[in-house]
Image (cartoon, rainbow, N blue to C red):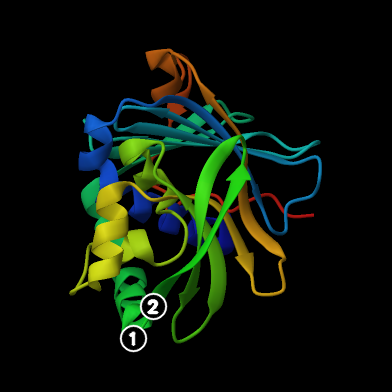
Amino acid sequence: MTRSTRSSLRLFAVGFLMLAPALRAQAFEGSLSVFAIGMPPDAGMSYFVKGDRLRLELSTPGQATLVMILDGPAKKQYVIFTDQKAYTTTSFAELMMTTDSVRKESERNLQGASMTPLGTRATVAGHKCDLYRYRDQKSVNDVCLSTEFGALGGVGGLWGHIGRSMEVGNPPPWAVKLVSSGAFALRLTDTTGTTLWEVRRIGAQTLAPELFTPPSGFSSMSDAPLGPPKPPTA
């Protein structure tokens, strides 16, 4: 696993860890297909959500699918290497230690940051969302937030600094309000309209518990990963 892959997966895991308690109470169960900038057209990124368990699959033609599982009740992360029939295990406590600098950077970026309603709505993946302009010390982005999924919004907190900020320091009141309401980012664009992140499909369905554990017959690797996969790149 490359350093950049570990770094991206680490950010992903932090977003989940901070919002796992809320996910326990939410009713949504199913899958989401997501596009992220840099992904080739034939690559895929899918999330599977069941209570406070989450599975991420990253696929690119010609390469083995990379799978990450976050198990809230067990407080463990698994990264599964399908081509090697092997997996690694990291405790949530270890993840939190390795993400300390990331969380502190998120706190710094949020100092003086703002989230301004733009007063317009859009439809993304068949669901309504409200447009906001997010501005911090380093970036300006437009984000379309939906509250139709209850606490599933925590998974959407993988976007940007909002979710990660809740673990450190004193997040601004607007961030607390959005996270508490389950604001889920269906789409994130820059101010030129370039899509950085977008949910393409949302499907409610019953998921088998086996999706959220390492497959039978796979062997455990001794070295734990430092963090989750980034989206496939061309």
Relative depth, front residue between 58 and 207: 207
Image: 160 above or below 54: below
The answer to whether residue 214 is visible is no
Horizontally, is 10 left or right of 150 in the view?
Answer: right
Relative depth, front residue between 162 and 126: 126
Q: Residue at x 33, y 37 (%)?
A: 150
The x, y position of residue 179, in whole percent, is 30, 54
Q: Which mark is residue 114?
A: 2
Relative depth, front residue between 109 and 134: 134
The answer to whether residue 199 is visible is yes
Q: Are marks 1 and 2 in contact (CB under 8 Å)?
A: yes
Image: 37 above or below 77: below
Q: Residue at x 25, y 73 (%)?
A: 172
Tell me the amino acid under the disc marked 2.
Ser
Tell me the amino acid under the disc marked 1.
Gly
Residues at marks 1 and 2, CA–CA distance in whole angstroms: 7 Å
Q: Which residue is mark 1?
A: 112
Local secondary structure at mark 1: loop
Local secondary structure at mark 2: strand
Horizontally, is 228 left or right of 102 in the view?
Answer: right
Image quadrant where residue 189 sits: bottom right
The x, y position of residue 25, in whole percent, is 22, 31
The x, y position of residue 8, in whole percent, is 51, 58
Q: Which mark is residue 23?
A: none
Q: Residues within 10 Å of mark 1 (few under 14, many from 20)?
A: few
Which residue sits furthest front?
A: 119
Q: Residues within 10 Å of mark 2 (few under 14, many from 20)?
A: some
